[in-house]
Amino acid sequence: MYNVGDKIVYPMHGAGIIESIEEKEILGKICSYYVMKIPIGDLKVMIPTNNVNEIGIRDVISISEADKVFKVFKNEPHELSSNWNKRYRENMTKIKSGNIFEVADVVGCLMQRDRTKGLSTGERKMLSSAKQILISELVLAKGLNQHEVEDKIQEYLYAD
């Protein structure tokens, strides 16, 4: 069970801080929810407390793990499938995993592909979503603001 003030990650939405725990009645049933504020985009999300494990809710990574995430951008980008649909499915699986290293890999690969070959509309949306998920967790883990994290990603990705 998490508490108010805890920093958690909600796969497919990003990381945030639990602002409150509320009970809501839905379809005649009273359920408890975490109300999480995501630092990017000023978004609030309600997460049912009874199935956090099934959803994949986890703690935000440590500072040292966050430093390792940035190193993912130093890796040589691996060859992506030339089939757009297959690439999209593979990347979506990585994002849904909730693993920040997988999300960072998707961001890095899509940013590199955008630079060299361009992205389809669907992949551009995916990149935007994956970046938001990644940046929201790195902001909370490192205590930086959104722009500082974006600059650091660019620095690692495009450093020679």
Image (tube, grey):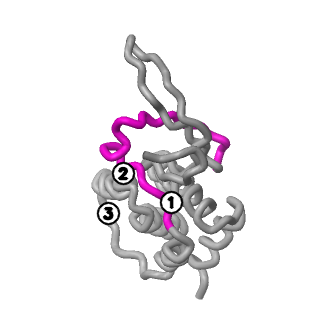
Marks 3 and 1, the one that precedes in the sequence: 1
Magenta-colored span = 40-61
What element does badge 3 sit on? loop
Q: Nearer the viewer, residue 131 or 1?
A: 1
Marks 1 and 2, the one that precedes in the sequence: 1
Q: Is residue 36 visible?
A: yes
Q: Position of residue 145 (x, y in %)?
A: 71, 61
Q: Which image quarter: residue 35?
A: top right
Q: Position of residue 109 (x, y in %)?
A: 44, 68
In the displayed structure, 84 sits above or below 69; it is: above
As drawn, the label of residue 60 is 1
In the displayed structure, 84 sits above or below 102; it is: above
User: Label 3 is placed on what type of residue?
Assistant: Ser
Q: Quadrant of the C terminus?
A: bottom right
Label 3 crowd (10 A; few <14 / some 14-19 / many >=20): few
Q: Nearer the viewer, residue 121 or 26?
A: 26
Label 3, label 1: how far apart the Cα atoms are: 34 Å
As drawn, the label of residue 96 is 2
Q: Residue at x 52, y 59 (%)?
A: 134
Label 1 crowd (10 A; few <14 / some 14-19 / many >=20): many
User: Label 2 is placed on what type of residue?
Assistant: Lys
As drawn, the label of residue 82 is 3
Q: Nearer the viewer, mark 3 or mark 2?
A: 2
Q: Residue at x 67, y 65 (%)?
A: 143
Q: Nearer the viewer, mark 1 or mark 2?
A: 1
Q: Position of residue 116 (x, y in %)?
A: 50, 70
Q: Residue at x 34, y 38 (%)?
A: 51
Asked if the residue at tag 1 contacts the one at tag 3, i.e. Cβ–Cβ closer than 8 Å, the answer is no
